[in-house]
Every structure is written in structure tokens, then in C-alpha cells.
């Protein structure tokens, strides 16, 4: 085998790069927005041009020979890649103290959670624990009931004042 690349189309090169990265035809097709059949055809053509029996061997040869010959438009991997942001271990509470001080963490926290209005800030209610979800439902039911009773009392008072 010569130390030069056979004449490959850009599509064949793309497919061999992705084969070298361990992708199968279906995954390559999704990435390149072509059909699986097109990927297989490009790989078969590459096999014939390289004169090798397997797609992995063709990809290996393409990568090793391609690295030896300098290419102007070759992809260069990033030198620095930012670390992913860490997830917040606990969603922020809508009643969190700015100074972070709480008098009695156990009792006060439960009382604050029961009396808290609305979902916690900085997250959705789906991030709540099971007991947090139950408390949110109970809180919503109690507040709705209290609102309905208050509205009925106001309407009854208005009718008494008019009548």
C-alpha cells in the first residue's frame, strides 16, 4: 500500500472519519443528513479504492495516511474545552435567607416549606422531592379552599349590605 491517499470524494472522507471514531452507518447517516444506503455506498467505494476488506481497516489507513500528509482544510481539535457546569445540588428556595442563616434548621425549614407560596425560585416543581411535591399540592389545595371561602364570605356580606 502506498503512503498516499487514493482519490476520495469529500463524502467518502467524511464517512471514513466518522467510521474511525467508531460510529456505525446509521449514526453516520444521521450526522451527515444522508441515507444509510448512501453511507454504505461511500464506505464500499472507499474499501475498493484502498483495496482492503473491512471498513475499520479503510478508516485506519485513511486516518494514518491523512495525518502524514498535511492538509490545508484539515480539522484541528480544540486545545481547550470548557468543563461542563456543575448542577446545583439543591434548587433554591423561594424563602431562602440572603445571609443564609436559619435559627432552627429542622423545625423552621419544615414550617417554611409548608407556608412557602409558589414553586421554589431557580427551578421547576419537578425538581422537588416527593415530600416537597406533596406539600406543594396540599398548600395549593388549602390556599384554593381559603380563597373560595373568602370569596363566598365577601359575596354573602355584599348581599347582606345591599339587602
Image (cartoon, rainbow, N blue to C red):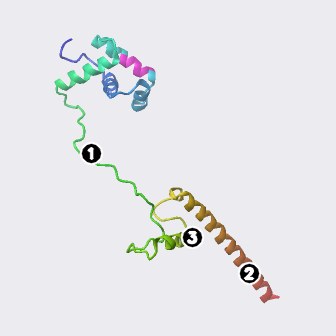
Q: Which of pointers 1 and 3 lies earlier in the amino acid sequence? A: 1
Cα separation, mark 1 vs mark 2, equals: 63 Å
Which quadrant holds residue 149?
A: bottom right
Residue visible at 61% across and 68% down? 139
Residue to which mark 1 is pinned: 81
Residue to which mark 3 is pinned: 114
Could you tell whether 105 is left or right of 152 in the image?
left
> Which one is in front, 71 or 111?
111
Query: How far across and how far down the image is residue 1, in percent?
Result: 21, 11
Give the magenta-colored segment's residue range: 37-43
Q: Secondary structure at mark 2?
A: helix
**How dense is the environment of label 1, judged by Cα within 10 Å: few (below 14), some, or many (20 and up)?**
few
Could you tell whether 123 is left or right of 44 in the image?
right
> CB of mark 1 within 8 Å of CB of mark 2?
no
Cα separation, mark 1 vs mark 3, equals: 43 Å
Closer mark to the observer between disc 3 and disc 2 = 3
Residue 110 vertical placement versus 41 (above, below): below
Closer mark to the observer between disc 1 and disc 3 = 3
Which quadrant holds residue 13?
A: top left
Query: How far across and how far down the image is residue 121, in percent?
Result: 47, 65
Residue 92 vertical placement versus 83 (above, below): below
Residue visible at 28% across and 19% down? 8
Reply yes or no: does residue 136 show up in magenta.
Answer: no
Q: Main secondary structure of the magenta part?
A: helix
Q: Secondary structure at mark 1?
A: loop
Residue visible at 32% across and 23% down? 16
> Which one is in front, 145 or 130?
130
Cα separation, mark 3 vs mark 2, equals: 25 Å
Residue 106 vertical placement versus 11 (above, below): below
Q: Which of pointers 1 and 2 lies earlier in the amino acid sequence? A: 1
Residue to which mark 2 is pinned: 153
Q: Which of pointers 3 and 2 lies earlier in the amino acid sequence? A: 3
Amino acid at each position: 500500500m502506498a503512503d498516499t491517499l487514493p482519490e476520495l470524494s469529500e463524502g467518502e472522507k467524511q464517512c471514513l472519519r466518522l467510521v474511525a471514531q467508531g460510529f456505525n452507518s446509521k449514526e453516520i447517516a444521521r450526522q451527515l443528513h444522508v441515507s444509510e444506503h448512501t453511507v454504505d455506498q461511500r464506505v464500499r467505494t472507499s474499501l475498493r479504492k484502498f483495496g482492503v476488506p473491512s471498513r475499520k481497516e479503510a478508516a485506519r489507513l485513511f486516518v494514518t495516511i491523512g495525518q502524514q500528509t498535511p492538509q490545508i482544510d484539515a480539522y484541528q481539535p480544540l486545545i481547550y474545552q470548557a468543563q461542563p457546569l456543575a448542577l446545583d445540588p439543591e434548587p433554591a428556595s423561594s424563602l431562602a435567607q440572603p445571609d443564609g442563616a436559619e435559627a432552627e434548621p429542622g423545625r423552621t425549614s419544615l414550617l417554611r416549606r409548608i407556608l412557602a407560596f409558589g414553586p421554589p425560585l431557580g427551578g421547576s416543581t419537578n425538581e422537588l422531592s416527593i415530600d416537597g411535591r406533596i406539600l406543594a399540592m396540599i398548600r395549593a389545595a388549602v390556599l384554593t379552599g381559603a380563597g373560595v371561602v373568602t370569596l363566598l364570605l365577601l359575596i354573602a356580606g355584599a348581599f347582606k349590605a345591599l339587602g
